[in-house]
Image (cartoon, grey):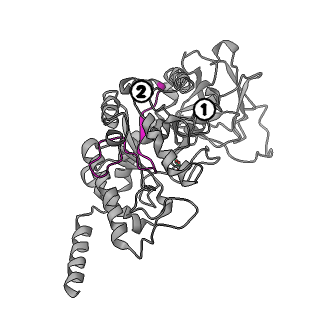
Amino acid sequence: MKLKNTLLIALSLLMTATVPSLHAETPEQKAERMEWFSKAKLGIFIHWGIYSSGKTSESWAFHNQIVTLEDYMKQREEFTAANYDPAYWAKLIKESGAQYTVITTKHHDGFALWDTKAGDFSAVKSSPAGRDVLAPFAEEVRKQGIKLGFYYSLIDWPREDYPNIYRKGPARYDIHKEPERWQHFVDFNFAQLKELNNTWKPDLYWFDGDWEQTAEDWKAKEIVAMLRETNPGVIINSRIQGYGDYDTPELGVPVTKPQSQWWETCMTMNDSWGYRLDDKNYKSDMVLLRMLVDCISLGGNLLLDIGPKADGTIPEEQVAILKEFGRWTSKHKEAIYDTKPGIPAGHVQAYTSLSLDGKTLYLYIPYKPTENIEIKGLKSRIKDVRVVGNNEKLKWVRYNDISWSEVPGVCYVEVPENVLDEKITVLAVDLEEPIKLYRGAGQVISFNDYDD
Ligand code: GLC
């Protein structure tokens, strides 16, 4: 017993010694590592698995006992990937203006898209696709110069060594009473993650399902350390119990800027992550583009989801949305990637962002203005107001620019109908200096120099 304990202590000391400390990174180094992510603004999420036959939701359908596990698993017979064209997927993603993509390598149902040696449940061994469908996608994504992200579910409900399968009902076992059985599962997660990491060195991991166990039980710290050991630049989302790099508010754009410097809102195009035969409740491209500029104005990214069908085709509604994103993002590049969060609400009736040097204020106008656009509290002098995408200069005036007052007057920009974008018009207000704002409550006159 004593010997066993000493061995265990020695082993854990050895592990901590080889685990690179998460705190070794300075804020500057982290900012550098996060640079591509903070400039990306748009990513495409892909939910693809046996649920893509379209009959049930991804994994939750059996977990919530909407269908039996057996019926859920039968869907694998339809996962043919017969019309799967990874080069087309990657091209479509690239053309949408997205800078990264995140694909479900394995959802909570445990079905792996790659040829995993750690388990038997995969596209290769358990579906008519009969091949690794992740490898060719990873290759095409990299060819297009897009960053590659892997969604990986920590949960694997169907496995016998995972403690619970259904939301309601008794657990299979208690992980603290049967530590070896739990360790078996933890080893399995490590083995799969090692495969993914060693084979593809993805640019990002998107963990999910961390809410079911504690960080200690998942071995969250050790997972992150293991991934970083051979893939030091990798970015990790927050769903790994405090060991991630950025926040993932889900299905809603925050109203105020999140505390964390890096964040991403993940969003469905309709009401489902994976393909659903009966879900036609698509948001319009305008609604989704608004969400994109909303994220940009708050300094975050939009991770927009698509759900390809089991044969690998992407539903036409989703293709159309990606194409419209492509039209809008290619026209407005200047006001997307090299930007930082905009100015507080109340200065202008529009979403805003700033160029990285702070000398250009971008206004995203998601409506047809019936009047001039008003900008209040802008202390900096304006050089020009331009329309992004066609560089036309616009007329503007500043009223009440009073020398004795620190309140900078109000600017009005004329926006003729012919410069409007069909969805969201973007104006660039070029300033003579990095932006300065007046944020006060107005000023009472103390002297009047009108006659000077
Ligand atoms: C949730 C769900 C999951 C989905 C994910 C995407 O965590 O568990 O089904 O894949 O959100 O953000």
Name which residue type carries label 1.
Answer: Leu
What's the residue at 58%, 39% (across, down)? 272
- Which image quarter: residue 397? top right
Q: Quadrant of the N terminus?
A: bottom left
Asked if marks 1 and 2 touch (Cβ < 8 Å), the reply is no
Q: Quadrant of the C terminus?
A: top right
Q: Nearer the viewer, residue 197 or 62?
A: 62
Q: Nearer the viewer, residue 395 or 137?
A: 137
How far apart are the alpha carbons under marks 1 and 2? 20 Å
Q: Is the CB of mark 1 within 8 Å of ligand 1?
A: no
Question: Horizontal and vertical percent for residue 399?
Answer: 74, 29
**Res. 238 visible in picture:** yes
Question: Horizontal and vertical percent for residue 198?
Answer: 25, 47
Q: Residue most toward the bottom?
A: 2
Name which residue type carries label 2.
Answer: Trp
Magenta region, residue range:
96-121
Q: Nearer the viewer, residue 86 or 385?
A: 86
What's the residue at 35%, 31% (across, down)? 141
What kind of element bears circle 1? helix
What's the residue at 35%, 62% (across, down)? 186
What's the residue at 44%, 29% (across, down)? 311
Horizontal side of 365 relative to 212 (left or right) equals right
Q: Is residue 313 above or below residue 77?
A: above
The image's mark for residue 89 is: 2
The crowding category of the residue bearing disc 1, from other C-alpha atoms within 10 Å (few below 14, some 14 to 19, many at least 20), is: some
Q: Main secondary structure of the magenta part?
A: loop
The image's mark for residue 288 is: 1
Which label sits in the foreground, 1 or 2?
A: 2
The image's mark for residue 111 is: none
What kind of element bears circle 2? helix
